[in-house]
């Protein structure tokens, strides 16, 4: 079989040309939000915003600056004052805190273990939501945004809103593979399920709100999931919110 390399890039699909097209994607950890959202943004020629990276960046800043994560006022203060700069394209993702590139460091187990302290801080959330809405407006409202509260709080009027979910088993397996298989079952459960349980005390990302579509990727491979999400986006654009 002859396989050409690099693979031909799929043609960009033009939807709502010249008009706003915000695609809001929420879901639990390991459901595929980040990777699938990037592929969807590429396919639709849209910008891309990883909101989880912003929560992680604040957590990294607190750990790095010895800011007590249990001090709610201090964490909120950190969210309000840090300089955040991040890529808004699906390729070459990066994020900087006060000019320091923390793209790698925000993915360490230490930051992952600490990030719920930021995610459950309502003052920090309000500030990050405000920043995210500002980024969406500045993108010309043609952007895929993924996180936990995008369909409900950050962009409740987005042209397409969906929850991307998958069974616990699928999410644990995918995260294990993604991290290279070095984690024990207990460690993976803490990284994925325990963190989701903590985060879901302040945001609902398991159940779709009114008008929000659901894509369950448990039985789908990556390409099928991207395709299912694109189908939902086309349907939302052509027919409106989920019934
Ligand atoms: N439908 C799928 N089938 C198989 N693997 C997938 C699927 N969707 C995502 N993945 C893989 O699962 C891992 C976790 O996906 P990721 O996008 O990081 O999830 P999230 O952002 O929701 O935490 C990645 O390695 C990704 O490539
Ligand atoms: N809009 C968002 C995005 C992320 N969060 C929180 C929830 C997560 O614990 C952290 C990190 O999010 P991220 O999407 O990077 O997490 P995963 O790696 O997909 O599990 O931030 C949030 O509360 N609201």
Image: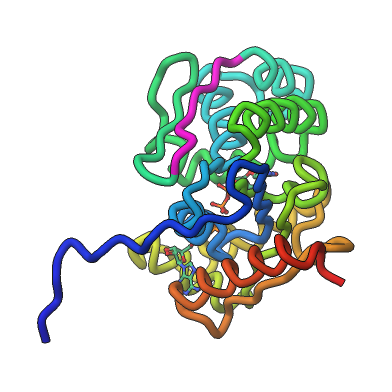
Comparing 203 with 48, the one in front is: 48
Comparing 130 with 205, the one in front is: 130
**Residue plotted at (65% across, 38% down):** 141
**Residue plotted at (15% across, 65% down):** 5
x and y percentages locating residue 137 in the rendered image? 67, 30
- Quick check: is 83 in the magenta stretch? yes
Q: Count the marks: how many?
A: 0
x and y percentages locating residue 212 in the rendered image? 79, 63
x and y percentages locating residue 113 in the rendered image? 57, 45
Q: Which residues are magenta?
A: 82-89
- Quick check: is 34 in the magenta stretch? no
Farthest residue toward the front? 17
Rendering colour mode: rainbow
The quadrant of the image that shows the N terminus is bottom left
**Residue plotted at (62% across, 46% down):** 145
The quadrant of the image that shows the C terminus is bottom right
Comparing 92 with 170, the one in front is: 92
x and y percentages locating residue 204 in the rendered image? 81, 56
Vertical side of 2 occupied by 100: above or below: above
- Give the side of residue 207 with respect to residue 171, left or right: right
**Residue plotted at (85% across, 63% down):** 211
Vertical side of 85 occupied by 192: above or below: below
Secondary structure character of the magenta stretch overall: loop
- Give the side of residue 166 with respect to residue 71, left or right: left
Q: Indicate the quadrant where residue 77 lies.
A: top right
Vertical side of 130 occupied by 53: above or below: below
């Amino acid at each position: 079989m002859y396989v050409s390399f690099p693979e031909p890039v799929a043609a960009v699909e033009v939807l709502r040309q010249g008009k706003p097209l915000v695609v809001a994607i929420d879901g639990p950890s390991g459901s595929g939000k980040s990777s699938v959202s990037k592929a969807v943004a590429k396919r639709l020629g849209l910008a891309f915003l990883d909101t989880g990276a912003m929560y992680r960046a604040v957590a990294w800043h607190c750990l790095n600056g010895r800011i007590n994560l249990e001090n709610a006022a201090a964490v909120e203060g950190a969210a309000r004052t840090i300089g955040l700069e991040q890529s808004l394209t699906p390729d070459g993702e990066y994020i900087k805190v006060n000019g320091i590139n923390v793209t790698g460091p925000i993915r360490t187990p230490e930051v992952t273990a600490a990030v719920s302290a930021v995610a459950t801080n309502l003052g920090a959330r309000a500030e990050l939501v405000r920043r995210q809405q500002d980024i969406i407006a500045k993108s010309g409202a043609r952007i895929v945004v993924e996180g936990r509260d995008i369909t409900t709080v950050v962009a409740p009027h987005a042209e397409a809103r969906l929850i991307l979910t998958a069974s616990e088993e699928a999410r644990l397996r995918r995260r294990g593979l993604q991290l290279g298989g070095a984690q024990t079952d207990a460690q993976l459960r803490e990284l994925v399920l325990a963190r989701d349980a903590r985060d879901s005390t302040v945001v609902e990302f398991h159940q779709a709100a009114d008008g929000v579509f659901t894509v369950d990727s448990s039985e789908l491979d990556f390409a099928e999931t991207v395709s299912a999400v694109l189908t939902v986006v086309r349907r939302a654009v052509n027919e409106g919110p989920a019934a």
